[in-house]
Amino acid sequence: MAPAALTERRGNVMVITLNRPEARNAVNAAVSTAVGDALQEAQDDDDVRAVVITGAGESFCAGADLKAIARRENLFHPDHSEWGFAGYVHHYIDKPTIAAVNGTALGGGTELALASDLVVAEERAKFGLPEVKRGLLAAAGGVFRIVDHLPRKVAMELLFTGEPMSSADALKWGLINQVVPDGTAVDAALALAERITANAPLAVWASKRIALGVDDGVITGDEAGWARTMREIVALMRSEDAKEGPRAFAEKRQPIWKAR
């Protein structure tokens, strides 16, 4: 089987590519393991000065693998569940991270972008948190991070409706840094990384820690959001609706909600 994520060095930059194009790079345990291990490798290697994350094919990431959820499979790294979704969203590293969004980035895809320091997106890219359409919530940091990245009313509309946002609107509201022509996201991200890696690495890494409020490898301001998210998702996942949403998706039908 092909690796669930590929890594490549471009000078001082590590490029991580989600490699499940047949599933629009939906995240399962294999993806979380491959990405998490690559991210840790980048953190431990002083020659890596920045990380670019992207997707194979024409999708960035379609979010969690709902078919795997319907089968009750674990989606996390088997040895480092604390790294969270895709081995990425709760896995702090000092090196600047750039999401090269080369297509659809819904659900967990948007959460990967939110967890990245910078985002370059192609014109065709779409962002959104459609979990409520499946009886779930954006438990990979999306709910509390989206309100920090967007004006509150804009963020709440995305959360409540589950509807997508174009890359142009994402740029307008400050969710992303650049919109680039289709097929050029990785090149644009590497160009941005080159501007970063030209600078003194220790100064860049220290600046990131201060800007994000990092103590002992933890973004302290995020911890209350993670605690609330875990409390809510544990209760939600016991509900009939949380089972119905992925089941309806797998069966290609509209869900029937019961609010219980």
Image (cartoon, rainbow, N blue to C red):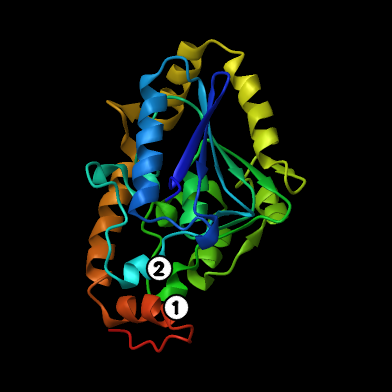
**Residue 171 or residue 102, whichever sits in front:** 102
Q: Secondary structure at mark 2?
A: helix
Q: Position of residue 39 (x, y in %)?
A: 40, 33
Res. 92 in view: no
**Measured along the vertical axis of the image, is residue 136 above or below residue 227?**
below
Side of 79 where 1 appears, left or right: right
Tell me which residue sits at (37%, 80%) in the image: 247
**Residue 215 or residue 92, whichever sits in front:** 92
Q: Which labelled disc corresponds to residue 249?
A: 1
**Residue 108 or residue 209, whichever sits in front:** 108
Measure how far apart labels 1 and 2 are at the Cα level: 7 Å
Instruction: Indicate which disc, 1 or 2, sits on the residue closer to the N terminus.
Output: 2
Side of 201 where 81 appears, left or right: left
**Measured along the vertical axis of the image, is residue 58 above or below residue 36?**
below
Tell me which residue sits at (30%, 26%) in the image: 215
Q: Which labelled disc corresponds to residue 66?
A: 2
**Measured along the vertical axis of the image, is residue 213 above or below residue 20?**
above
